[in-house]
Amino acid sequence: MSNFFNKTLRRAALTLVLAAVSTLASAGVMVSIDTKTFGVANGYLDFQFSSPGNGVEATALMSNLAGFGSATVDYIENVTPQAGGYLFSNLAFNELAFALDFNSVLSFDLSFAGAADPVSGYISNFSITAFDNLGNWVGNYDPVTGAIAQYLWTPPTVPGGSGSIGNGPGDPGAVTTVPEPSDWLLSGTGLALMALVLRRRRSSAR
């Protein structure tokens, strides 16, 4: 009876960890922008989060901003300052623009959350655009949108499920994207627990 209880407990713990991993694995990325590649001394970085048509509500959170020390907020609409970062919602037009010198590397964490959408599959787009002081796009931008980076959030199809983040056209020379370290840690923890359970099963089968 005790052996059965221990096995059940281990399986329940593993299920919880794997559920956490699947929920958070696509939650966020770290974004790094090398503004020195733009070829102009200064200008603006513009951020927007949008969704077509009748997409479900989703939010994008910029946090842990680094390298923005000399930047000033030039324009903000329907974006909420939050804990040293900025929260966007795709339900209304929004825009956040910084005026800054293009002489450093900027970075921030970008995370998404949203309601489940089992039907439409609408994708929300977090886009980053760079301008010079005359309003011209700079960087190796997408010729249609002007964006140097686009992060495409696909909502989960079931409540409690995990959405996914994809990259749209952008500037790979200026923008670097990596998964959040916490996501790697959770994934590693889940894999380690799976390996432990398999090892114990093999030992008990001998």
Image (cartoon, rainbow, N blue to C red):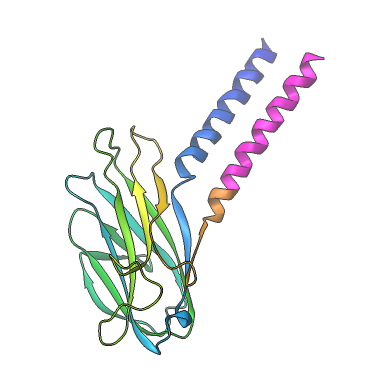
Q: Nearer the viewer, residue 91 or 136?
A: 136
Give above or below for 204 relative to 133: above
| Residue found at x 59% / y 24% | 11
Residue farthest to the front? Answer: 143
* Whole-percent x, y for residue 21 in the image: 52, 40
Residue farthest to the top? Answer: 1
Give above or below for 163 relative to 132: above
- On whether residue 137 falls in the magenta region, the answer is no
> Does 64 sit left or right of 18 as displayed?
left
| Residue found at x 65% / y 34% | 193
Q: Range of the magenta residues?
A: 185-206
> Does 88 sit left or right of 184 as displayed?
left
Quarter of the rendering containing residue 138? bottom left
> Does 70 sit left or right of 74 as displayed?
right
- On whether residue 205 falls in the magenta region, the answer is yes
Image quadrant where one finds the N terminus: top right
